[in-house]
Amino acid sequence: MKKRLISLLITAFLIFSLLFIWYMINTKYFLGSYYKNRYEDSKIVEQMMNKLLIKNYEFINTHSMEELVYIVEVMENDAENIVWFNKDLMLLARKPLSSYNEKMILSKATELNVADAEIKLGFYNNNPVIVLVTKQNEIILNYDTLEVVLIFNKKVV
């Protein structure tokens, strides 16, 4: 009976070990590229902030339509701004944070029947934009006027 219990414990330990190894391999496989991209993004953002001599900043998101654009909220000279720049560290746009009107964006999303959309900032056609992301499409709005610029339908498979 004692041998059987020891054998059972060893078998359980081996099965647990195999499951743990399988989990670790899959986690690295699926999340490895995500963490690598996040690391690369953080290095580019840090380089841009050093170039602009900005110490206080908060990464908002990236947007890739025509090119990969980084969007960051910054505090410069006692003013809060949102800046858009590309991977070549070229400043594309700068807007005061006060120009971001979430109530107006939510109102426009409701008007477009996408009240549950995720709101992101982006860059399209050399202009800052608001992107309303849903499962079916991405609606791109002009940042200043909230006029619909483009509706990008996602292919649902």
Image (cartoon, rainbow, N blue to C red):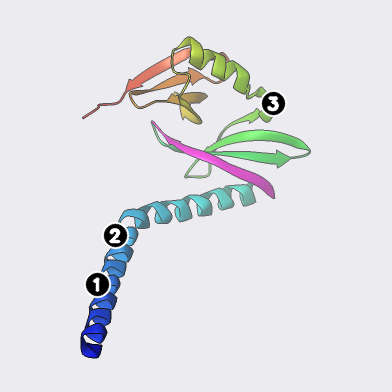
> Type of residue at label 1?
Ile
Q: Secondary structure at mark 2?
A: helix
Report the mark closest to the observer, 1 or 2.
1
> Type of residue at label 3?
Ser
Q: Residue furthest top?
A: 111
Q: Answer with left or right where residue 47 lies relative to residue 24.
A: right
Measured in 3D between alpha carbons, the distance from the residue under mark 1 to the one under mark 2, in whole angstroms, is 17 Å
Compared with 63, 131 (above or below) is above
According to the picture, the residue beneath numbered tag 3 turns out to be: 98
Report the mark closest to the observer, 1 or 3.
1
Q: Mark on residue 26? A: 2
Q: Mark on residue 15? A: 1
The quadrant of the image that shows the C terminus is top left
Residue 41 placement (x, y as % from top left): 48, 49
Q: Mark on residue 6? A: none
Compared with 91, 144 (above or below) is above
CB contact under 8 Å: marks 1 and 3: no
Q: Residue furthest right?
A: 78
Segment tinted magenta in the rendering: 55-65
Q: Main secondary structure of the magenta part?
A: strand
Report the mark closest to the observer, 2 or 3.
2
Quadrant of the image occupied by residue 27: bottom left
Q: Secondary structure at mark 3?
A: helix
> Type of residue at label 2?
Asn
Q: Answer with left or right where residue 66 lies relative to residue 103.
A: left
Indicate which disc, 2 or 3, sits on the residue closer to the N terminus: 2
Q: Answer with left or right where residue 86 lies relative to residue 5.
A: right
Quadrant of the image occupied by residue 66: top left
Nearer to the camera, 18 or 105: 18
